[in-house]
Image: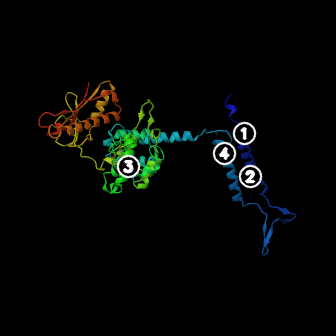
Amino acid sequence: MNTSDFTSNFWNIYTAAILIASFVGLVWLLVSQNKTKRTGDKVETMGHEWDGIEEFNNPLPRWWFYLFVITVVFGLAYLLLYPGFASFKGILGWTSHNQYDTEMVKAQEKFQPIYDKFAKQPIEVIANDPEAKVIGQNLYNTYCIQCHGSDAKGAKGFPNLTDKDWLWGGKPSEIEYTIRHGQIGVMQPYGGLDPFPDETVKDVASYVLSLNENEAFRSRSNPQSAAKGKVIYDQICFTCHQADGKGLQGLAPNLTDNVWLWGPTDKDIENTIKHGHTNQMPAWENFLVTKKADGSEDTAKLRILTAYIWGLSDHTGEAPEILPYQDENGNAVTDTPADDAASVTIGDDGVVKFYFATGSTDIAANANDSLAAIVAGAGEGKKVVISGFHDATGDAAQNAELAKNRAMAVQAALVALGVNEGSIELKKPESTEGDGSNAEARRVEVALQ
């Protein structure tokens, strides 16, 4: 069996015959009507008259006639130059694909330098760049606005991107993954299932309301009904939503906050429990990630859109204070930076130190060169060792957690720039020597080994 068993030339012949007949018919009509109709010496009329006025059967005015002739000539020339006559591809060989590719090449030449500027910057830096915000909003309006709305606050069934509620994670790397690969969320329908008969749906909904942190929701819960609902919740729902109702990232939403994707009314909650929901965030990789000639990926658009969306939730929109700590030639200096300012320095031993503002995990906006140096070293096969340091005073557990998050922020920035996560080693946070009250207590060190 070959392709000829599934294809036929009939339609090519059919359309060609109609096209030829149309042109022949039009030419015949023009020629046949291009003369005065006479009977003897008397000009024929159209056979009707009004108030003694008759219409002669004369040819079209010359200018009108030649407009038709030009139309015929234009049509023939078009079919000769461009595809349109059966399977003939035209002398020029034009195709919509070729035109699209040509336009994309021109657009690439015009806009790629702009995208390249942001390609290797950390998401946190891109999110505060005014030019990147404009580009990010344009990308958002192209790919995201249909579901999440012009204000990014979503709608029923479509998440709000401006709050702090991220089912699949709100870190830049997590948002980037969701945009690139998409996500599918499924809430199984339980109505009518044993041990979940329909009459218990209201009880479970009442218990869910009782878990909420907001008094307005808790007040809608009936204590007796909630008590019965808790029994079912502890058997079925706690697996995903946990016993405290706060859920698990990537698996089940938090039931204790004020965010209700499918509606906050009693009826909405009962409907979700009874009928379930399936949500799909489509993958945009094919639209935002392109392959370069050398086989590498161009992720600039993806990163700019990620930064824009992340900024809607986690940023105020104001650019952070930038303290570059550079000499007049733009080279990084090794002096200890001013206290309580995000910055980065490179020591004589090659160790890169990232300093953080009090209580913050934001990497300094001027960290690009230092990050690039680390990326280059990792590309040579060196191991990247990241060490976080924390204050020696106050709550030790909280300090260690903050140091860990700062180290992970540096790790995420390096991974985003192409460093293999497997080549990065995160060391256990260490306490800073001394009183730990200055910038040295809020640093992350990165060494290449």
Amino acid at pointer 3 = Lys
* 438, above or below 71, in the image: above
Query: Which residue is found at the position 54% from the left and 41% from the top?
Result: 99
Where is mark 2, residue-wise?
26
Residues under labels 2 and 4: Cα distance?
A: 16 Å
Looking at the figure, which quarter contains the C terminus?
Answer: top left
Q: Nearer the viewer, residue 75 or 370?
A: 370
Assess disc 1: are there few (<14), some (14-19) or many (≥20) residues with their C-alpha within 10 Å of its C-alpha: few
Specify whether residue 113 is in view.
no
Where is mark 4, residue-wise?
77
**Of the image marks 2 and 3, the number of the one nearer the N terminus:** 2
Q: Kindly state the secondary structure of the residue where label 2 is placed.
A: helix
Assess disc 2: are there few (<14), some (14-19) or many (≥20) residues with their C-alpha within 10 Å of its C-alpha: some
Assess disc 4: are there few (<14), some (14-19) or many (≥20) residues with their C-alpha within 10 Å of its C-alpha: few
* 343, above or below 269, in the image: above
Assess disc 3: are there few (<14), some (14-19) or many (≥20) residues with their C-alpha within 10 Å of its C-alpha: some
